[in-house]
Image (tube, rainbow, N blue to C red):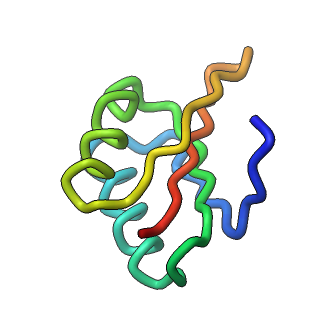
Amino acid sequence: MDVKVDRTLDCKGLSCPMPILKMAKEVKSMNSGEVLELLGTDPGSKTDIPGWCEKTGNEFLGLEEEADGVSKYYIKKA
């Protein structure tokens, strides 16, 4: 994905609900329009993160899955 990332949050090895809680805290501290890249390994995040974005009005830009099992999620703050 060709996205300009403003911050990266490493949530590898964390299980639900920790990636969502950490992401929510990080997004809250960001400016409108900034993009967060979240690195995670929890399979539940594939539905949790887009759902959280929909509920909170933030924009889910997409997901990239790496060969090493790490997923990269891109979230744009509303």
Where in the figure is residue 64, as x and y percent of width and height? 64, 28
- Assign the N terminus to one quadrant of the image: top right
Left/right placement of residue 39 relative to residue 20 reads: right
Residue under the image location 43 percent in, 53 percent down: 59
Where in the figure is residue 58, as x and y percent of width and height? 37, 60
Up the image or down, 63 lies above or below 49; here it is: above
Residue under the image location 26 percent in, 48 percent down: 54
- Between residue 21 and residue 2, name the one nearer to us: 2
As drawn, which residue projects farthest toward the left?
55
Tell me the quarter of the picture where residue 5 sits: bottom right
Tally the numbered discs.
0
- Assign the C terminus to one quadrant of the image: bottom left
Tell me the quarter of the picture where residue 71 sits: top right
Left/right placement of residue 69 relative to residue 42 reads: right
Where in the figure is residue 47, as x and y percent of width and height? 31, 29
Residue under the image location 33 percent in, 53 percent down: 20
- Between residue 6 and residue 2, name the one nearer to us: 2
- Between residue 28 and residue 18, name the one nearer to us: 28
Residue under the image location 44 percent in, 71 percent down: 27
- Between residue 43 and residue 62, name the one nearer to us: 62
Where in the figure is residue 37, as x and y percent of width and height? 62, 53
Tell me the quarter of the picture where residue 49 sits: top left
Up the image or down, 57 lies above or below 63; here it is: below
